[in-house]
Amino acid sequence: MKDFWDFMGWLFDEAVYFMSSETISGFGLNFNLWEWALGSCIVSLLLYAIFRVLD
């Protein structure tokens, strides 16, 4: 690694690899971490919208 940006590029590549390779298994479903994070955000936004309407 030559400089800071080389290091940041390497760190980003490793993070993407980690997020894509790690899986969460439960209730017969398999998710990688990207899918889990995206699903959590969508569910949170839906719940927020529902409770805003009900308020």
Image (tube, rainbow, N blue to C red):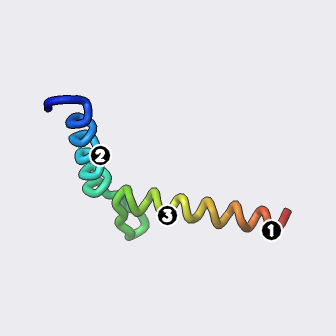
**What residue did someone put label 3 on?**
39
**Element on which disc 1 rests:** helix
Task: Name above or below for residue 39 compared with residue 2.
Answer: below
**What residue did someone put label 1 on?**
53
**Element on which disc 2 rests:** helix
Task: Name above or below for residue 9 compared with residue 40.
Answer: above
At x 64%, y 66%, the residue is: 46
Q: Mark 2: few, some, or many residues within 10 Å (few <14, many ≥20)?
A: few
Q: Earlier in the sequence, mark 2 or mark 3?
A: 2
Image coordinates for residue 24, horizontal then vertical, percent: 36, 57
Q: Earlier in the sequence, mark 1 or mark 2?
A: 2
Distance of label 2 from label 3 (alpha carbons): 19 Å
Image coordinates for residue 18, horizontal then vertical, percent: 27, 49
In the displayed orientation, state which residue is furthest to the top.
3
Q: In the picture provided, is 12 more to the left or to the right than 44? A: left
At x 40%, y 63%, the residue is: 35
Nearer the observer, 30 or 27: 30
Q: Amino acid at mark 2?
A: Ala
**What residue did someone put label 2 on?**
15
Looking at the rendered image, the quarter that the C terminus falls into is bottom right
**Element on which disc 3 rests:** helix
Q: Mark 1: few, some, or many residues within 10 Å (few <14, many ≥20)?
A: few
Q: Amino acid at mark 1?
A: Val
Q: In the picture provided, is 2 more to the left or to the right than 25? A: left
Q: Earlier in the sequence, mark 3 or mark 1?
A: 3
Tell whether label 2 touches label 1 (CB within 8 Å): no
Distance of label 1 from label 2 (alpha carbons): 37 Å
Image coordinates for residue 32, horizontal then vertical, percent: 34, 60
At x 28%, y 57%, the residue is: 20
